[in-house]
Amino acid sequence: MKKHNFYAGPSILPGFTMEKTVEAIKDFAGTGLSLMEISHRSKEFVAVMEQAQALVKELLQVPEGYSVLFLQGGASLQFYMVPCNLLNKKAAYLNTGSWASKAIKEAKLVGEVVEVASSKNANFNYIPKEYNIPADAEYLHITTNNTIFGTEILKDPDVAVPLVADMSSDVFSRPVDVSKYNLIYAGAQKNLGPSGATLVIVKNEALGKVERTVPTILDYKIHIDNESMFNTPSTLAVYGCLQTLIWLKEQGGVEAMEKINIQKAGILYDELDRNKFFVPTVPNTEDRSRMNVTFVMAPEYVELEKEFNDFASSRGMLGLKGHRSVGGFRASIYNAMPAASVQALVDCMKEFAKMK
Ligand SMILES: *Cc1c(COP(=O)(O)O)cnc(C)c1O
């Protein structure tokens, strides 16, 4: 039976990424060695790193004066590394979910943090729009896609301070104006590649301004000066990211991806709004994530939750269970998810409704 992969992360990747990575595990770039057993300083791997960095710049139209790094430690390490390098006195944070809250917690270890707004009172089911940013804040930190709660900031906010963003679960799903950001980070395992690599795009000028001593391994400048090879990078994960970037370019880049993503998410939200058995957890249509579609059974049908889950599983739908803090269901429909799988889920919901 065909499997439809709705896992939130690690999650679906293009078949192309898998095939190319399998090939390289057996014989990497004609070396006769496995990708897993060759030096990261070999010319073959250095070429992988350089090509991956160049493709990130090309696909996101990264302006001059920015560096691209592939680090380790996940987005979770960035929660601390970002303020350690960029927060001298004060930073502003928008609290839109669990990951944003974790970023705030780490930043508080470093300096003054102003939480400009929070949607916690409504279990993070919307994106706050009205907030004031202190004029002396060094940056505003946002989480563009809230993987757990199914909300997304779909437009780069217009604010008077530079932005910093956790784009772990929506990077490359649409164009972004990188010039508004001092730093963008993303754990690879949602939209980009295997777990183990973390993409960082940082404005060089923003670095070197804090008064504290930054530990060597946490210092972006050290990683930039060493071409993202200060320590051994996660070679396999970086290789996987490169293959996804090549695939992305072939699909027409982030503009084409955005069109497809709007269409894919639209099919699913339309059904959720139509089918009386289900309710999307995010009421405002403009805040709904195109990557993680969260929904629950309608109040009068809550007792059918397990039955629907079993019904969907029996049709090859995997990973639909919602995060424990929201309950219900979550369909993660990242870049690599084919529209046909989204349609299969919609058909499954329609049939379930008919059966009842
Ligand atoms: C998954 C996720 C994280 C955590 O990433 P790790 O790489 O596991 O540290 C952080 N932020 C967002 C938005 C996520 O989706």
Image: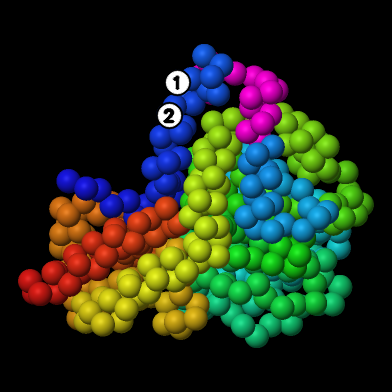
The kind of secondary structure element at disc 1 is helix
Q: Residue 15 in the image: x percent, y percent?
A: 39, 42
First to last magenta residue range: 33-49
Residue 26 numbered mark, or none:
1
Q: Residue 35 in the image: x percent, y percent?
A: 54, 23
Is label 1's Cβ within 8 Å of ligand 1?
Answer: no
Amino acid residing under circle 2: Val
Q: Is residue 136 above or below residue 79?
A: below
Mark 2 surroundings: few (<14), some (14-19) or many (≥20) residues within 10 A? some
- Asked which colour scheme the image uses, the reply is rainbow
Q: For the point 43% across and 46% down, which residue is it?
A: 13
Labels in figure, total: 2
Instruction: Evaluate whether residue 196 shows in this view.
Output: no
Amino acid residing under circle 1: Lys
Q: Are marks 2 and 1 in contact (CB under 8 Å)?
A: yes
Left or right: 310 as drawn, with respect to 215: left
In this view, the residue farthest toward the bottom is 130
Q: For the point 48% across and 20% down, which residue is it?
A: 27
Residue 22 numbered mark, or none:
2
Q: For the point 72% across and 47% down, which residue is it?
A: 68
Residue 346 quadrant: bottom left
